[in-house]
Amino acid sequence: MEKNNMKWINFLHLYQPANTESFNISEANEKSYKRIFRALEENENIVFTFNVAGCLIMRWEEMAEFELIKRLVSLVKKGRVEITGTAMYHPILPLIPEEEVIRQIDENEEILKKHFGSDFKPKGFFLPEMAYSPEVAKIIYSKGYKWIIVDEIIHNGKLNQLDVTKVYEDKNSGLILVPRARTESNTYVPQKIAKLLKEGKTETIITASDAELYGLRHIDHTAEFEKLLRAGGFETQSISDFISEQKDIKKIDTVAGNWNASEEEIADGQPFYVWYNRKNKIQMKLWEMQRLVYKTVYEYQDDENFKWARWHLVRGLISCNYWWASEKDFQLFSGVTWNPDEIERGISDLTRAVRSISNEKTKNIKIKVEKMAGDVRFRVWQRHWKTHWK
């Protein structure tokens, strides 16, 4: 393929829930993560930026996937992969207390330092689900991060308002904003890049998607990803290197939003609609339960079982518990986002968080949480059998 001036800035998000079964992680390892690592190892001119959620690294440790971690560390040390910071357990940061945001950022930094070196500090930060709010952006900046990758909709709550080949400065926080091209990112990206190259496109394109699309959720029967990297004809860079080349970075205003928020959702004051929809009774009940559990767990930080209470709590905070109750059809690589077993997993962890506390003063709260859990479970399965089953 004849070389042109296209520059592909590719961001991949590697994540599996902390409370998922090991076989789910093994499947993602085999179908997606190892495939991506191998492709980078075999094509030394390719550089990507990764977010690897700390809870996934933790699960790799538990599953003795040390060779996989070693390969990732090697790619980072060779400058083939840039790693970002994130929140350890993948919660929706604008929807949890500020102190928990900071705890999870710190915990994620610790596991990165464990494997990449005691002085390792990423420049970039990934907001789980790209769920941006001005308040959270200020926290991230205060923690020493320089940039975040965002969806273009956070500028004025509108699509197609930004030149997504450039970066911007957030007037609110001082962070550099790297807007992904939503349309191109919501495809099987290697296929899209190959198509653009064939058409002779030469502009910069910034894509951001889940790493699991590279094999797990999208089967690439003809190995288009590997063929694309071998064929070349484009340049890649880490996001930090790309930012360092930019001049006259424009400052822009921002609003709350996420990777797939619609203009209508933002206008309606629901920037995190998929996880917090005021009309979704199951989600609202789940958030009500979560707030009580969170308050209770931290009221008893001196409890002898606090470690185990928080162990369950952070798993009850993850975005997936609310995502699978959204009943939204993204028309991407899966059907409607509804899975009663995944919702129940979150309910179970929240319940067990309070059950774990040994202090006798929590007896009445325990009973209240059990009642709330029973109510949400009933609503979930009633909805499932009446609406989604067959």
Image (cartoon, rainbow, N blue to C red):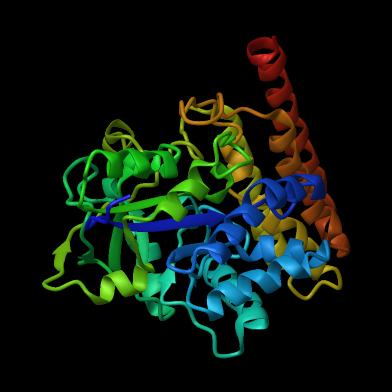
Q: Position of residue 147 (x, y in %)?
A: 34, 70
Q: Could you tell me how many numbered marks the image carries? A: 0
Q: To which quarter of the image does residue 177 belong?
A: bottom left
Q: Residue at x 51, y 52 (%)?
A: 92
Q: From the viewer's side, name the closer residue of 241 and 125.
A: 241
Q: Position of residue 225 (x, y in %)?
A: 49, 46
Residue occupying the far front of the picture: 2
Residue occupying the far bottom of the picture: 119
Q: Quadrant of the C terminus?
A: top right
Report whether 121 appears left or right of 250: right
Q: From the viewer's side, name the closer residue of 148 and 311.
A: 148
Q: Residue at x 70, y 52 (%)?
A: 29
Q: Position of residue 49 (x, y in %)?
A: 45, 64
Q: From the viewer's side, name the closer residue of 193 and 10.
A: 193
- Would you say residue 175 is visible in this rendering? no
- Would you say residue 257 is visible in this rendering? yes
Q: Position of residue 130 (x, y in %)?
A: 42, 52
Q: Residue at x 70, y 13 (%)?
A: 389
- Position of residue 98 relative to residue 316, above or below, is below
